[in-house]
Amino acid sequence: MTDAERLTRGFVLSIQESPFRIAPERAEALVAQIGRSAWSLDIVEGPVNFEAFPNDKKIEGTYSALLSLWAVAASIRLLLALMQTAAQIGLEQVVIVPGGAGSEAIALKNAALALIRDHTYAWNEAPSEPDANAVFCSEDGLTNNLFLAAASFVVLHECGHLAQNHLVHTAHRHQQEFDADRWAVAWTLDKVADENHRQFRMLAISVAFIWIGLIDEVRKTTATHPPAAQRFSNAFTQFGETGEDSLAFEISSYAIKAFFNPTTNLPQSENARDALVEQLIRYSRRE
């Protein structure tokens, strides 16, 4: 048994229920569209991956995908805490150095990358590990909540392939990925009534695309999947009329910089929306 399976098998039931939980106001509609029992979601050993098999009405993910996504969510929560502390003491810029504040967040990012490269990676080299039984209001529990929300979006993306009857063998695989992204973002956000829930869901979507970005770092753009930066930018256009000072935008902009562009100076944007747009532009230029 790999460390990935050992550390994440306690989440499997929650992952299987996740597409119905991220947007509970649409659970019945999801059942009507793809059916609760007409398709299966299995978690298996193997390289980091989630994949839909429309002909079989099946979604398959891997334990290594779950653990690497958890590491990204945990890292971003640590970056959030660092950002809040910096704001409280009036710092305009934070430099993360080995052993200093924020170094655990970078270590988790690097652990996720190591797992993407090799799904048998030994997790005892990582700074922390998930606890599937953590109390919801604890730090571990809050990390699990963000992880499961991000995983929900990943699974909904695969549901989008099923709902739209996508083909496995086609010359239009990139367009199918864009279509599945669009379907999943719309499903997650279009009917949400509470602004706090909307902010959380947008952050979860951002976590998912940052995780996809790490996969791109290792595997690069392929014939089946377009660049993560382009996919993230497309999702941003669906976030709608969210306030310029959105906390989800602010956290996402810091996370993109920390993960993909850590050595450049932080631009002094006028608001969180502009900061996220700036980071998405810089991120896109890297690819």
Image (cartoon, rainbow, N blue to C red):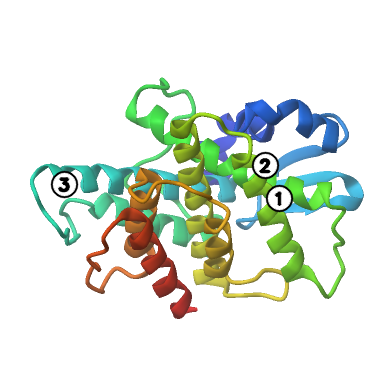
Question: What amino acid type should be assigned to the residue bearing mark 1?
Answer: Trp
The N terminus, quarter of image: top right
Measuring 78% from the left and 53% from the top, which residue is drawn there?
161
Q: Given the current orientation, which residue lies at the most extreme left position? A: 89
Q: Quadrant of residue 141?
A: top left
The residue where tag 3 is placed is 87
Q: Residues within 10 Å of mark 3 (few under 14, many from 20)?
A: few
Describe residue 84's horizontal placement relative to residue 240 as left or right: left
The residue where tag 2 is placed is 187
The residue where tag 1 is placed is 183
Residue 160 in sight here: yes
Q: Nearer the viewer, residue 114 or 71?
A: 71
Distance from Cα at disc 2 to Cα at disc 3: 34 Å
Describe residue 48's horizontal placement relative to residue 158 as left or right: left
Asked whether the residues under the numbered discs 1 and 2 touch, taking CB atoms below 8 Å apart as contact, a structural biologist would say yes
Q: Is residue 15 above or below residue 123?
A: above
Question: Which disc is residue 52 wearing?
Answer: none
Q: Secondary structure at mark 3?
A: helix
Measuring 43% from the left and 67% from the top, which residue is drawn there?
280
Q: Position of residue 238 (x, y in %)?
A: 58, 53
Measuring 59% from the left and 41% from the top, which residue is drawn there?
189
Q: Residues within 10 Å of mark 1 (few under 14, many from 20)?
A: some
Of marks 1 and 3, which one's residue comes earlier in the chain? 3
Q: Quadrant of residue 231?
A: bottom right
